[in-house]
Image (tube, rainbow, N blue to C red):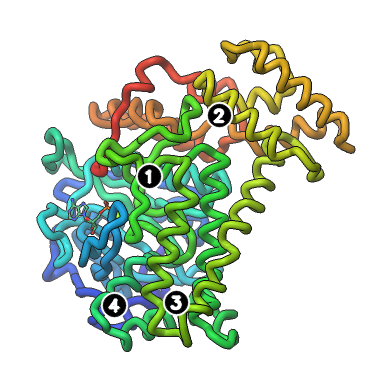
Amino acid sequence: MFDPTDLQWSNGFASLGEAFYTRLPTPSHPQGLPEPRWLATSPACAQWLGWPANWQDAPHALAVFSGSTEWPGMARLASVYSGHQFGVWAGQLGDGRALWLGEVQTPHGGVELQLKGAGTTPYSRRGDGRAVLRSSIREFLCSEALHHLGVPTTRALALVGSPLPVRRERIESAAVVTRAARSFVRFGHFEHFAHHGLHTELRQLADFVIARDFPHCADAPEPVAALLAEVALRSAELVAHWQALGFVHGVLNTDNLSILGLTMDFGPFAFLDAWDPRRITNHSDDQGRYTLARQPDIVWWSLHALAQALLPLVSGEAVLREALAPYPGHFQARYAELMRAKLGLAAAQEGDELLWRDWLNLLAADKIDHTVAWRWLGDGVMGRVRDLFIDRAAFDTWATRYRARLALEPEAADTRAARMRQTNPALVLRNHLAEEVIRAADQGDLAPLHHLAAALARPYDETADNTHYTALPPDWAGDLELSCSS
Ligand code: AMP
Ligand code: MG
């Protein structure tokens, strides 16, 4: 039997002191969900933590993960951060509905656990501290789906629902997601202390992040510049994955950017169906700041905001500029590797980039489904791919070039096809798939949610069981709109 009193808690962030957070122990903050009910859990996340499959049966688990009580050793708190939203300084934000439970030791190091939606905190501003079922299902599914696609991301352990009504555009029911990550520190945590001239705390935070998450930076001549260089590399890696997959985060404010380069804070995100890199997925984003096409530049901009915040900790601007400089090149190189793999190319050749750019332009011109087109291309059955296009002549011209390029490959066609099937997913968390399981869960039917979660854990498999998920999206999928509270 899993005994939570055996868990070891290190609570590194809590050890920073009260300038960084407000403690919210359960006696003074009993805002957990009323009438909580398990809606879903992630076996893969539990496994990552080293917890047994039946961990939910542990004493008080449901009360702990709906926010009403705590296990011994937890140190519940809400942290303070600030940030730039939509490119402008937004001042103090902080964990308005996220609640840190603590950092638990696992067989491979500490992992921080947070509840999202467990009630108001001193940083809730005018918010209610809650999360609705819809957005919680989306976060739960997407964080695990990205993980299974090999994309750096915060994880999701559990999803708990409640009949508690929550007012958004309409009345919805409340839910709490338990999320897990090695660190939930955001760019905005650094910006907060820099903005207020709190250089002692700024230094303390940088030292903490370096010591725990980037220990090799401690030996660099300028450890903080080395830290920034690491964050830039990880961010480049992250965005390369998003671009290759067609994943739009939707709200890349600096308070939603992870110091570890993890995808975090899932709101109006989308995996693009029809390939349209300029599509606005967040209907509060009038200017199209957060479209897929702009993600590499927006993260680059945000890294400069982080650099600005770190300036008091280094010898001068030059070392920070130097630390950031590799970002564009690193992004390009990683993106190229991923795109080459998507095309099934084992070795790099001059002209490969033009090949995938032209392919993407073809997809954009005819608004072809991104996931299906790549998957079918990998099957090597060109006739089926061709049928996706309106402009068949344009496709044929491109396909001739592609075949000529493949002829230069050392690998046999079936080996390549097998590899491409492990590279181009058969299914991603399309908005309409999330919508379907949300509607069912709203009516009390959790089977579709569980079925989809299980399928997303094996995104490269095509089985008799997941044809609904691997098919082209229905017409109504194109009309779904998402707001920040999605
Ligand atoms: P987000 O757009 O979700 O990244 O949130 C931006 C800021 O608003 C963060 O400080 C959140 O904690 C806060 N926030 C978002 N929704 C709520 C809510 N329902 N209650 C309290 N604070 C919230
Ligand atoms: Mg956020």
Which comes sooner in the sequence, label 2 or label 4?
A: 4
Q: Residue at x 39, y 46 (%)?
A: 41
Marks 2/3: CA–CA distance: 37 Å
Q: Nearer the viewer, residue 123 or 30?
A: 123
Find disc 2 in the rendering and name its residue: 371
Q: Label 1: how many residues lie within 10 Å, few (<14), some (14-19) or many (20+)?
A: many
Q: Amino acid at mark 1?
A: Tyr
Q: Are marks 2 and 1 in contact (CB under 8 Å)?
A: no
Q: Which mark is residue 290?
A: 1
Q: Real-space Cα distance between discs 1 and 4?
A: 26 Å
CA separation, marks 2 and 1?
21 Å
Quadrant of residue 310 within the rendered picture: bottom left
Q: Where does the image place residue 81, in percent across and percent down from the top left?
A: 27, 68
Q: Earlier in the sequence, mark 3 or mark 1?
A: 3
Q: Quadrant of ligand 1?
A: bottom left
Pick whichever, 64 or 275, lies toward us: 275
Mark before the other along the chain sequence, 2 or 1 = 1
N-terminal of the two: label 1 or label 4?
4
- Amino acid at circle 2: Thr
- Circle 3 SS class: helix
Q: Which mark is residue 161?
A: none
Q: Is residue 107 at least partly visible in the picture?
A: no
User: What residue appears at the point 30 percent right and 44 percent down from the top-left corner?
Assistant: 136
